[in-house]
Amino acid sequence: MFKPDHGTIYIIRHGETDGNLTKYLQGCSKDNPLNAKGLAQAQKVMEFFKDKPLDAIYSSPLKRAQQTAAPLAESKGLKIHTVPGFKEISFGDWEGIEMAEIERRWASQMMLFFKQPSRLTIPGGRPFAEVQREAWTTFQNILEKEGHGRQIAMVAHGGVIRLLMCAFLEMPLDRMWSLSVYNASVITINEWDGNLVLTRMNEEVEKKLDENAGPL
């Protein structure tokens, strides 16, 4: 019978912003703060971890991730380690534009966005595969630095978390939008006999998620 090594990795998506609410692409140039609901969700994240020990917290440098990590870090007496490799995907010229408008103006490219993102390079943006390599390298470097048996929280963004999970699960990048990652949700990965095992995905920190929020 497997026995856990007691190491756990928690991957947390940031709380809600006005960009999430109005369904436009924020990417990495739109450094939006959390809105009122997002700030409340950050408190819920803190409460979610009330009885869970943590040894380290890593976060994207963008405001919405930092603000989500802040109450948790304060409650645990930990420093937030900022890692650029967890920044959101750069959506280039599409950032700050609502999804409906992008679909109207760039219809063929939006087909690739959802069906074959590995083939898409958004004008002014970065290839998704490049972002994935950077995020996966960052993830591996953190694990190497922290070592086995550690309790680690990582705060990032919907797009980059999907890319990271595709790498972890050895799924094709083109399946990234098959994964649901809601605001302020938690992914849990445990160590079992030295192996990393996904045990929970998209776990709620609130009793009920906003069904109208959408996955982006």
Image (cartoon, grey):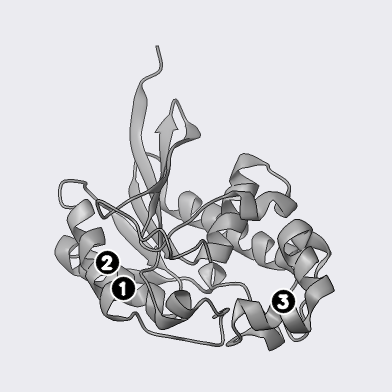
Q: Which mark is residue 38?
A: 1
Q: How far separated are the C-alphas under marks 1 and 3?
A: 27 Å
Name the secondary structure under disc 3.
helix
Report x, y in % for residue 69: 31, 68
Q: Earlier in the sequence, mark 1 or mark 3?
A: 1
The residue at which mark 3 appears reads as 103
User: Which residue is at a point 31% across and 73% down the rendered structure image?
Assistant: 38
On screen, residue 45 versus residue 211, left or right, reads: left
Disc 1 crowd, CA 10 A, few/some/many (<14, 14-19, 20+): many
Q: Earlier in the sequence, mark 2 or mark 3?
A: 2
Q: Would you place residue 202 above or below residue 103 in this image? A: above
Report x, y in % for residue 190: 40, 37
Q: Would you place residue 93 above or below residue 22 in this image? A: below
Tell me the amino acid under the disc marked 3: Glu
User: Which residue is at a point 40% across and 58% down the rendered structure image?
Assistant: 211
Task: Report the front residue among 10 and 179.
Answer: 179
Q: How far separated are the C-alphas under marks 1 and 2?
A: 5 Å
* Location of residue 77 (image quadrant): bottom left
On screen, residue 49 versus residue 25, left or right, reads: left
On screen, residue 40 versus residue 19, left or right, reads: left
Quarter of the rendering occupied by the N terminus: top left
The residue at which mark 2 appears reads as 41
On screen, residue 150 versus residue 175, left or right, reads: left
Report x, y in % for residue 37: 28, 74
